[in-house]
Image (cartoon, coloured by chain):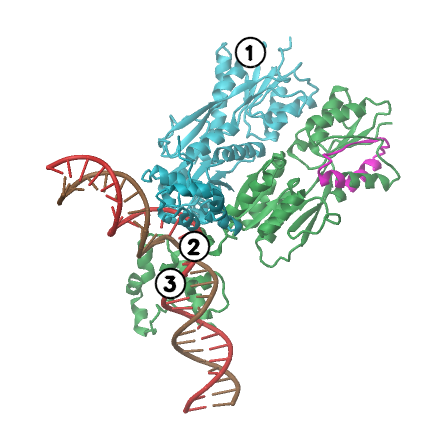
Chain colours: A green, B cyan, C red, D brown
Amino acid sequence: MTRPSQPRTPLSSGQDPGDLMTDDRISADPVEDFLKRRKKATINDVASLAQVSKKTVSRVINKSPSVRGETRDLVNDIIARVGFRPDPQARGLAFRRSFLIGLIYDNPNAQYIVNMQMGALDGLRGSGNELVVHPCDWKAEGFLDEIRDFVELQRLSGVIILPPVAEDQGLLDLLDELDVPFIRVTARNNDVQPPIAGLQVVSRDRVGCEQAGEHIVGLGHRRIGFIAGNDLYPSAHERRAGFEKGLANHGLTFSTVEPGNYSFDSGYEAAQKMLNRPDRPTAIIGCNDDMAAGAYKAAYELGLRIPDDLTILGFDDAPIATRINPTLTTVRLPTRDMAKMASEKLTSADTRPGASFVFDSALIIRGSSGPAPK
Amino acid sequence: MTRPSQPRTPLSSGQDPGDLMTDDRISADPVEDFLKRRKKATINDVASLAQVSKKTVSRVINKSPSVRGETRDLVNDIIARVGFRPDPQARGLAFRRSFLIGLIYDNPNAQYIVNMQMGALDGLRGSGNELVVHPCDWKAEGFLDEIRDFVELQRLSGVIILPPVAEDQGLLDLLDELDVPFIRVTARNNDVQPPIAGLQVVSRDRVGCEQAGEHIVGLGHRRIGFIAGNDLYPSAHERRAGFEKGLANHGLTFSTVEPGNYSFDSGYEAAQKMLNRPDRPTAIIGCNDDMAAGAYKAAYELGLRIPDDLTILGFDDAPIATRINPTLTTVRLPTRDMAKMASEKLTSADTRPGASFVFDSALIIRGSSGPAPK
DNA sequence: TTATCTAATGACACCGGTTACCATATAAGA
DNA sequence: TCTTATATGGTAACCGGTGTCATTAGATAA
């Protein structure tokens, strides 16, 4: 039975008669007086109002177990009433770390970036942390130094790294050295990479791609072309492996493969080449939506109708997927959820180092995939 | 001839013999010794190495004029050699403000957001400020309170507000009250709005739209349809006014106007309506690219070829503009430059309150606009 | 009953910079 | 030469929290 944290204006040894003059008491309530001053409360204000030392208030803020329940309730009550919120700057200075999470990336896909930012913020909400975005030039000369400066100077509380930067072993090592918690987002389960200290969010691009492969074979396609992704990206390999698996499940392989670099133009060119072959494929899979959209263009120029003459598939479920005609059959990754998980795990103390969090991709069937022409 | 900032270990009244033992002196150089410790330098380290008080170092950092040139050079030299960088947290605590710039927006256009972020970071580079992104729900219940919390708690150094939130008078007043420097990005010159305290970056959407209107008339079109933008956005009015001006310059007006809300679907529906009219327009202008892309879809479904049967124009030069077939004639705004200007002006002390910085839009002719069919 | 231990709390220095104010040195004016 | 103005540097307090360690009170053991 907890004593109802009665406003035992400290030192008050609860006098009964007081109840009768509630109104007067309120006007004499130190907290009310304080509120009239309309000043942002500091820890000192809370301490004096609660008649405890600021250290005790600090303990309450930081949920130290060594505070008597009664005291804790009293302090929390005052905190709530005066609307006290500890200053992140001062706290950060004392803690030797800011309450900032850095988001590091070098990725041209705007929708992806915005999704990740939104997701990261979802996960940060209420944690008292803010998100500092840090796009960078991964391949530039002083990249690592620049990141070091950023992390050290801002004393970041944590770092989220997006692909493809997330594959930079040097960066991971650096973050390790700087002793800052970090989490990387990647498409590859690091069964190959040397184990790293940080956390990771892993997307299983393969899953949805395998579904897509099966889907396409199920539609009767036998000559299937593939526009590969940027070779530096693990996602490119994972997706390809997934699609191939889907085909292989039915004893098929790609009839033709062209390189691409995830850009619209590269997809366009690759598709042109494929579609000009004597054994033109009846279906083309792009390693991402932008390249698939490029294939649309190539098909359009050759007078091919989609999906009647040509089936096209992509990956990402980018905005463009629903803005082209016909809408694009593609594979979706729960990017926002992944980012949310990333920031949540990064800021929750009870995450064990090295942990991985896995998300599956899934096929989304739209108008660009149809039965193979006879 | 500047005296080579010789390690005149202050108090040294320059003794000649010293020069002879340069080498010995270097090995005994306190700075070298310090560097061997591999510890991040603090202002105290710099002060003791330079044999001055930390206050003097502080003066140098903050470019106080009341430091002797000689002293300043010496201190700067030490700062450079030990790689000292003042801690933003400590500095912020003393200054009562962080070195964070908040970017506030509620805008679904990913490419626009990313461009603005990049631009803002361009302008912040080297200023010692970081960018904290803050997407929000402009129309939500406690919107203003939430912003207040954000700005106050983080003690932001400045705020950049993007459209359409930038039109919220309540928000502008709040920022005024909080006394935080801010700059809004808007399409409307505030000849209508009451004057505000903050700065603004103004885009002249009209300019490029007028060009576009003339372009379309020049191609012989006489029946021109317009898909309007979200009525709440000043950009919608400005663009429309610009297009109308372009037509009016040649004695024309829109033959039909349909409402839209900047979304792909709304553009699709609006175009459907227009194209099913008996006096079908030969050209359709979308108030943004997404809606123009929607018009593509409508045209496609009706078997209309672009630009042979139908000319379509958009606004934004979004990524989709070059990913659809044919590529979209549109109007471009220098968004990144605008954001760069915004953050630069926000962080430069010598900007007078209330200043506006104006950017022009410009027509980009691509494949979706052609001669009017006979 | 007294000694010992543990839980709860407070005093004080400190995080790394800043401002306010004072002290000193130098230059100018009488 | 002596006083007054001006420029410069030093000292202490402060920004708003936290760590360390000492202290107090209550509980347990002897």
Discs 1/2, front? 2
Q: CA distance from mark 3 to mark 2?
A: 13 Å
Task: Write down the region rendered in magenta.
Answer: A209-238
Instruction: Give left or right: position of A21 versus A313.
Output: left
Instruction: Give left or right: position of A332 versus B313.
Output: right
User: Which residue position holds label 3?
Assistant: A47
Discs 3/1, front? 3
What label sits on residue B217 in the rendered view? 1
Instruction: Give left or right: position of B270 versus A26.
Output: right
User: What is the x, y in percent for residue B100?
Assistant: 46, 42
Please, what is the three-letter code of the amino acid marked with disc 1? Val
Which residue is found at the position 76% from the left and 39% from the top?
A237
What label sits on residue B53 in the rendered view? none
Which residue is found at the position 66% from the left and 39% from the top?
A164
Neighbourhood count class around disc 1 (C-alpha, 10 Å): few under 14, some 14–19, many 20 upward? many
What label sits on residue A85 in the rendered view? 2
Query: Which residue is nearer to you in this view: A364 or C1?
Result: C1
Callout 2: chain: A
Q: Quadrant of the C terminus of chain B?
A: top right
> Do dots 3 and 2 share one subunit?
yes
Please, what is the three-letter code of the amino acid marked with disc 2? Arg
